[in-house]
Image (cartoon, rainbow, N blue to C red):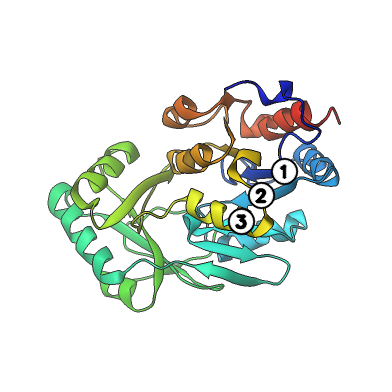
């Protein structure tokens, strides 16, 4: 694909879609002032910024508030389209709990016992952490004693971890064994997720973009992990961070600097600026 900076458009893209962890967020979970300034300058030119994250709304809202974000956000790996200005969900897709339990049993029969967590549906949906599951201690969770509690209320997804398999190996095994029941994706280190079949970031982004009246061809997307592959494939131009997983780099149109080096800002400054 040709470098979009060479295209004779006044506005190269009308929609800028960014993942959060490992992409817009630096390693210290903050957004740099440089990235804030460039995103604000791009917005001033008429392009919308949309956050597209694997985090559910409760784990995303504080980041959006810090950014002064009032647009649509795609959360929960595409399951939730959230209107930040109104503070309400526009769409929410749940994972069938019977299918999820069956998928989990099939995976454990193949690879052995798993540590499991679950993200409950809704604006205030808790993340339930089962025994042995390793999580980010800075994010709010509820610890549970057994699997029965996972199924008590509607959920968006399951998180699974294995004591020996790598994340890539576990994702592949889950897809091979239970791919007819759930989707399996890797969203970060130690983060393998089981999702409603067919759901991806591209699902939620396409819904949000439609509401904004922006087609895929006029969207540029940034990501760092295999769960971002559908989003980059959907967008007109896809950019992987320097710190991205090799699978994402292989399908990206461009690889920019890392999340700690303002990789998003560098690309946007080239395309929309200089600022």
Instruction: Please provide percent x and percent y for residue 133.
Output: 35, 56
Q: Name the residue under label 3.
A: 210
> x%, y% of residue 79?
48, 61
Q: Mark 1 points at which residue?
A: 14
Decide: is 107 above or below 164. below
Q: Is residue 142 left or right of residue 12?
A: left
Q: Do the residues labelled 3 and 1 touch (CB within 8 Å)?
A: no
Residue under the point 73% across and 28% down: 266
Looking at the rendering, in which quadrant would you find the N terminus? Answer: top right
The residue sitting at 64% across, 63% down in the picture is 61
**For residue 94, which numbered disc appears in the image?**
none
- Give the residue displayed 75% in from the left and 54% down from the top: 67
**Label 3: few (<14), some or many (≥20) within 10 Å?**
few
Report crowding for label 2: few under 14, some 14 to 19, many 20 or more residues within 10 A (C-alpha): some
Find the residue positioned furthest to the bottom: 152
Quadrant of res 246: top left
Rounded to the nearest whole Å, what is the CA distance between mark 1 and mark 2? 7 Å
């Amino acid at each position: 694909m040709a470098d979009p900076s060479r295209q004779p458009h006044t506005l190269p893209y009308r929609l800028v879609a960014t993942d959060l962890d490992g992409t817009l967020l630096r390693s210290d979970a903050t957004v740099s002032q440089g990235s804030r300034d460039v995103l604000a300058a791009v917005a001033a030119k008429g392009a919308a910024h949309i956050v597209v994250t694997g985090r559910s709304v409760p784990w995303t809202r504080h980041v959006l508030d810090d950014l002064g974000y009032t647009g649509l956000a795609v959360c929960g790996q595409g399951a939730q389209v959230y209107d930040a200005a109104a503070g309400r969900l526009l769409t929410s897709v749940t994972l069938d709990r019977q299918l999820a339990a069956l998928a989990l049993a099939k995976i454990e029969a193949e690879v052995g016992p798993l540590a499991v967590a679950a993200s409950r549906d809704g604006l205030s949906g808790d993340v339930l952490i089962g025994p042995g599951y390793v999580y980010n201690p800075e994010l709010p969770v509820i610890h549970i004693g057994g699997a029965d509690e996972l199924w008590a209320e509607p959920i968006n997804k399951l998180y699974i971890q294995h004591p020996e398999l790598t994340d890539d190996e576990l994702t592949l095994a889950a897809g091979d064994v239970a791919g007819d029941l759930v989707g399996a994706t890797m969203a970060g280190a130690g983060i393998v997720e089981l999702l409603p079949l067919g759901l991806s970031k591209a699902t939620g982004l396409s819904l949000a973009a439609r509401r904004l009246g922006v087609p895929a061809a006029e969207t540029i997307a940034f990501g760092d992990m295999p769960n971002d592959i559908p989003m980059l494939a959907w967008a007109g131009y896809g950019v992987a961070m320097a710190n991205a997983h090799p699978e994402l780099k292989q399908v990206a149109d461009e690889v920019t600097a890392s999340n700690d080096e303002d990789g998003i800002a560098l690309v946007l400054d080239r395309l929309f600026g200089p600022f």
